[in-house]
Image (cartoon, rainbow, N blue to C red):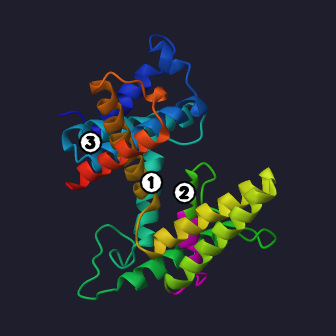
Amino acid sequence: MHTINDLIVLMSRLRDPADGCPWDLKQDFASIVPHTLEEVYEVVDTIERQDWTHLREELGDLLFQVVFYARLAEEQGDFTFADVVHDITEKLLRRHPHVFPDGTLSSRRGAEMFSEAQINANWEAIKQAEKTSAATAEQPTSILADVPNAMPAIARAEKLQKKAARVGFDWPESAPVWDVVHGELAELQAAAASGDAEHTEEELGDVLFSVVNLARHLKVNPETALRRANDKFIRRFGHIEQSLAAEGLAMNEQSLDSLDALWRAAKQAERGE
């Protein structure tokens, strides 16, 4: 069995200026990012399909991305893969005092138990302390500062809301959130009626943000919910295509009413009605 060290050696060979791989040699941090995002989504896809055989492969592809970035950093004298491993281990030891009370791998917590709320509160306090120690007095760090701009918008909205909620900026229950969603929809409808495109875009963003907040209160992952809605749309649209193809009909020649009837038939077929 190969080890992580073999993978690191392989990466150094691929980047060897003398006899490495031409494609790997011309890559830089920015050029690899699209591949990294693709690999992340492929990992998510295999998990959602419970395709454990291919998950092993996809996790390897994702790990290779990390090794690639570390190699680029090492070449320009910033850090190595070993530094990455050390830093994440140190950080997780520090953030899990309920598991490693002495901050070492060998330490044990004993019989003392902590609630999930206590663990989450402690985690956030430790993270905030880390940020405070790294920031200057003139430049205080917001608790939202470490939410990446490059995250998908829905996932980023959820993460921003969760962080704000951990310091008390949140509705205590879902009922007021429903009111917010309805209010934002009314504002969107008014903006659309006004013909102001910029204002309409702003209000649509508010609707989406409020729906993400509702999903969070309902304990539903909005990204997962939307992906499943996409998959459902593909299945039902495919039913329409197959039904028309079986009769030798073209979709663009059908009335909206006939297409809607096929759509409703697809829904009924899925539900076993």
Q: Judge whether 160 appears above or below 264 on screen.
A: below
Q: Where's the N terminus, which quadrant?
A: top left
Q: CA distance from mark 1 to mark 2?
A: 9 Å
Residue found at x 52% / y 19%: 25
Residue segment shown in magenta? 158-172
Pair 3/2: label in front: 2
| Image side of residue 55 versus residue 262, left or right | left
How many badges with numbers are in the image?
A: 3
Sequence-first tag of 3 and 2: 3
- Tell whether 207 sits left or right of 116: right
| Residue 165 falls within the magenta-colored stretch | yes
Contact between marks 1 and 2 (CB within 8 A): the answer is yes
Residue mark closest to the camera, 3 vs 1? 1
| Point 74% across, 71% down: residue | 140
C-alpha gap between disc 3 and disc 2: 24 Å
Q: Residues within 10 Å of mark 3 (few under 14, many from 20)?
A: some
Q: Identify the residue at image location x=53%, y=31%.
A: 32
- Return the residue nearer the eye: 164 or 15: 164
Q: Which residue is mark 2?
A: 154
N-terminal label among 3 and 1: 3
* Label 2: element kind: helix
Mark 1: few, some, or many residues within 10 Å (few <14, many ≥20)? few
Name the residue carrying label 1.
226
Residue 107 on the magenta span: no
Give the spatial CA distance, label 3 vs label 1: 22 Å
Identify residue for label 3: 55
Q: Amino acid at mark 2?
A: Ile
Quarter of the image holding residue 96?
bottom left
